[in-house]
Image: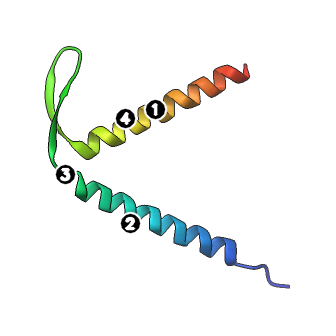
């Protein structure tokens, strides 16, 4: 009996949709912004600032989840 491939196709379609949205979002936010760090100021592309902020938020969330389990 052959296993259904429907969940695999759904994941692929969802992954392609997310990738397309990320590319569109990156292209829509290509302007540079000024970022103030503690010791310096720097111009960076907005998409880099958004992605870095999201990654830092995800790491902080994961650390808090782990801390809550212990």
- Reading the image, the residue beneath label 2 is 20
Disc 4 vs disc 2: Cβ atoms closer than 8 Å? no
Q: CA distance from mark 2 to mark 3?
A: 16 Å
Residue 14, x across and y down, in percent: 53, 67
What residue sits right under mark 3 in the picture? 30
- The residue lying at 46 percent from left, 67 percent from top is 17
Residue 57: numbered disc: 1
Residue 16: image tag: none
N-terminal label among 1 and 2: 2
**Residue at 45% across, 62% down:** 18
Q: Residue at x 35, y 42 (%)?
A: 51
Tell me where residue 25 appears, x and y as whole percent. 31, 56
Which residue carries the number 4 mark? 53
**Which quarter shows the N terminus?**
bottom right
Mark pair 4, 2: CA separation: 20 Å
Rounded to the nearest angstrom, the CA distance separating label 4 from label 1 is 6 Å
- Give the answer, above or below, for where 31 lies relative to 15: above
Q: Residue at x 57, y 25 (%)?
A: 63
Q: What residue occupies the far top of the structure in this picture?
A: 39
Label 1, label 2: how far apart the Cα atoms are: 23 Å
Helix, strand or loop at label 1? It is: helix
Sequence-first tag of 4 and 3: 3
Q: Tell me the crowding category of disc 1: few under 14, some 14 to 19, or many 20 or more residues within 10 angstroms, Cα based.
A: few
Q: Please, what secondary structure does the residue beneath circle 4 have?
A: helix
Q: Is 5 drawn above or below residue 60 in the view shown?
A: below
Query: Residue pushed farthest right?
Result: 1
Label 4 Cα crowd, 10 Å radius (few <14 / some 14-19 / many 20+):
few
The quarter of the picture where residue 5 lies is bottom right
Element on which disc 3 rests? loop
């Amino acid at each position: 009996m052959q296993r259904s491939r429907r969940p695999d196709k759904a994941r692929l379609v969802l992954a392609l949709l997310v990738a397309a949205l990320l590319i569109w979002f990156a292209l829509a936010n290509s302007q540079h912004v000024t970022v103030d760090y503690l010791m310096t100021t720097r111009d960076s592309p907005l998409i880099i600032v958004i992605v870095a902020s999201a990654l830092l938020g995800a790491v902080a969330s994961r650390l808090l989840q782990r801390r809550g389990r212990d």
